[in-house]
């Protein structure tokens, strides 16, 4: 495992994603690193288990 991947793994618990539609927040770890990398902007499309459909999510650091 390279250093970068290790860093992300350690950091993941501090991140969560928030559904912009309903406000549901879920642990980011559930969605993995690749999605984060693809979402350097402020919006990531992902499945919201509350809306039961694809929604725009925001990724935030919890501390
Ligand atoms: Zn939602």
Image (tube, helix red, strand yellow):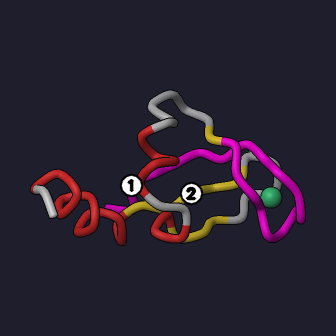
Q: On the picture, is 19 further left or further right than 6? A: right
Residue 21: in magenta span: no
Residue position for label 2:
17
Q: Residue at x 51, y 36 (%)?
A: 39
* Numbered label tally: 2
Extreme residue toward the front, this view: 1
Q: Quadrant of ligand 1?
A: bottom right
Identify which residue, 50 or 46, lies in the foreground.
46
Which segment is the magenta one? 45-63
Disc 1 and disc 2: Cα gap in Å?
Answer: 9 Å
Queried whether the magenta region covers residue 54, the answer comes back as yes
Q: Main secondary structure of the magenta part?
A: strand
Residue 34 spot, x, y in % from top left? 45, 49
Q: Secondary structure at mark 2?
A: strand
Image spot of residue 28 (x, y percent):
49, 64
Residue 44 image point, x, y percent: 62, 41
Residue wearing tag 1: 61
Q: Residue 63 appears in which quarter of the rendering?
A: bottom left
Q: Residue 35, how many percent across, how many down?
A: 51, 47
What residue is drawn where x is 17% and y is 51%? 4
Crowdedness of circle 2 by 10 Å Cα count: few (<14), some, many (20+)? many
Q: Quadrant of the N terminus?
A: bottom left
Residue 52 sits above or below residue 41 on the image: below
Lower sequence index among marks 1 and 2: 2
């Amino acid at each position: 495992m390279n250093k970068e991947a290790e860093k992300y793994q350690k950091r993941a618990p501090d991140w969560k994603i928030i559904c912009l539609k309903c406000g549901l927040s879920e642990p980011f770890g559930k969605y993995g690193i690749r999605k984060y990398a693809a979402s350097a902007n402020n919006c990531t499309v992902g499945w919201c288990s509350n809306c039961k459909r694809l929604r725009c999510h925001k990724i935030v650091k919890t501390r």
